[in-house]
Image (cartoon, grey):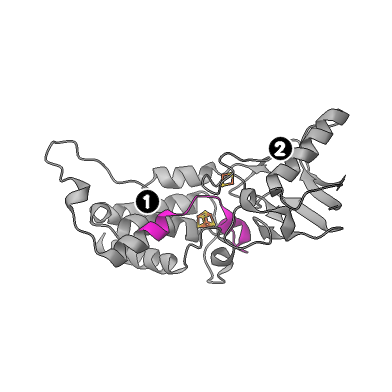
Amino acid sequence: MNLTLKIWRQRNSNSKGQMKTYKMSNVSPDMSFLEMIDVLNSKIISEGKEDPVAFDHDCREGICGMCSMFINGQAHGPDRLVTTCQLHMRKFKDGDTIVVEPFRANAFPVIKDLVVDRSAFDRIQQAGGFVSVNTSGNTQDANSIPIEKNDADKSFDAATCIGCGACVASCKNASAMLFVSAKVSQYALLPQGKVESKQRVLNMVKQMDDEGFGNCTNTGACEVECPKGISLKNIARMNSEYMTSTLKS
Ligand code: SF4
Ligand code: FES
């Protein structure tokens, strides 16, 4: 395939960025999107005129959530329920123009080109996304606590969130509610998570607000673009957890 790429280039967080056009020829439909950018970068390096395109990636198998980019106006591109690393060039046609941008949100400042700083998510996790371990010696083994199958399934579904940030980038308010609600829900549904549930939801929501994410207005773009199919029901669960915790405090 022959393609035209329009890619956001930005030297660092302080400089002004711009779209730059690159022509690609002989792109195999079997390449992943990231492999296609690897080929472009080899070409840029061999020409020696500019830096290669900076982009985040790690696992390249849909697990780590690093490969965040906006492709033709959609987080992780045109395919459904896949990350950019799992997107293949067969989803595009010969002659296509593909526009590639970083995830845009005030709370995700651009570091370079397509790389954004998603450490706000780490700080939200640190505010409550864990279960404290009681090491007194009296702790009941988690495996000996029976958990209802429906709750286990819903908790597991919430736990599949990979923290990629597509929900934030797709939301007109740059809201992080889908991400935070997945992290709150995975614990709220389990007996092990209920012990600290009140403080967890209050702390995580406070951190989310402090980081500058917007609020949720129920448009649902986050759910549509989420590569892991995280359900909006988690937001309803988080709101309910939050209300209950506020009334109890
Ligand atoms: S909820 Fe979905 S889109 Fe948002 S961070 Fe988690 S996996 Fe990514
Ligand atoms: S590189 Fe890990 S999810 Fe894409």
Residue 51: quadrant of the picture: top right
Q: Which residue is mark 1?
A: 203
Around disc 2, counting alpha carbons within 10 Å, would you say few (fewer than 14), some (14 to 19), or many (20 or more)?
some
Q: Quadrant of the C terminus?
A: bottom left
**Nearest to N terminus: mark 2 or mark 1:** 2
Tell me the residue at 19%/36% (across/down).
135
Q: Is residue 220 left or right of residue 181?
A: right
Tell me the residue at 41%/69% (across/down).
236
Residue 22, image x and y in percent? 86, 45
Q: Which residues are magenta?
A: 156-174
- Secondary structure type for disc 2: loop
Q: Is residue 127 left or right of residue 35?
A: left
- Res 92 seen here: yes
Ligand 1 within 8 Å of the CB at mark 1: no
- Of 106 and 94, which appears nearest the observer? 94
- Of 72 and 37, which appears nearest the observer? 37
- Of 154 and 206, which appears nearest the observer? 154
Q: Using the image, determine if residue 188 lies above or below residue 22.
A: below
Q: Amino acid at mark 2?
A: Ala
Based on the picture, tell me whether residue 164 belongs to the magenta stretch.
yes
Residue 97, image x and y in percent? 83, 57
Q: Which residue is mark 2?
A: 54
Tell me the residue at 39%/66% (across/down).
239
Residue 243: quadrant of the picture: bottom left
- Secondary structure type for disc 1: helix
Residue 30, image x and y in percent? 71, 51
Marking on residue 85:
none
Q: CA distance from mark 2 to mark 1?
A: 34 Å
- Res 247 seen here: no
